[in-house]
Structures are given as C-alpha cells and as structure tokens.
Amino acid sequence: MLMSVKVERLVISAIPELIDTWTSAFGFKHIDDSSKELYNRINLMVFPGTTLLEKRLNCLQPFEGQA
C-alpha cells in the first residue's frame, strides 16, 4: 500500500533494547553513511538515546495480483 503512493523508505527512531526486534523481525537496517548525509538535510525528530533505522520499500516484490 505504501508503495502505491511512492513511499521509498521507512525511517524509525528505535530504542537500543528493540533494535534487534526491528532488524530481525521487520527487516529494518542501520542507516549507511550516504543515507545519514541525506537525512541530515531534512527535518527529522530524533529522540536522545535512540538509533535511526531504515527499511527500503522500492526493492520489495508486489503482492500477487498487483503490478
């Protein structure tokens, strides 16, 4: 559904205790250096003591019956 409105990435601010859950169960990854530069240029709300994680949606396969 998000891809239908051209959302390319989801970015979350995760607490350290749940980083493993976000990465292993939901497929989020730590942000690489090139993405950090991109995110530094836009306004994001980042909470102290948290880590930014992202999930790229443009590489996901569409569900059967969707194009």
Image (cartoon, helix red, strand yellow):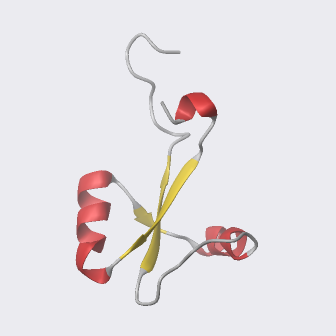
Q: Is residue 13 above or below residue 4?
A: below
The location of residue 27, given as percent across then percent down, is 34, 54
- Nearer-the-camera pick, 41 or 48: 48
Q: Is residue 16 left or right of residue 48?
A: left
Residue 4: quadrant of the picture: top right
Q: Farthest residue in the top direction?
A: 65
Residue in view at x 63 percent, y 36 percent = 6
Q: How many marks?
A: 0
The location of residue 8, given as percent across then percent down, is 59, 45
The location of residue 13, given as percent across then percent down, is 44, 72
The location of residue 16, given as percent across then percent down, is 30, 82
Q: Farthest residue in the bottom direction?
A: 49
Q: Is residue 7 left or right of residue 40?
A: left
Q: Is residue 8 left or right of residue 10?
A: right
Residue in view at x 25 percent, y 59 percent = 24
Residue in view at x 30 percent, y 72 percent = 19
Residue in view at x 53 percent, y 78 percent = 46
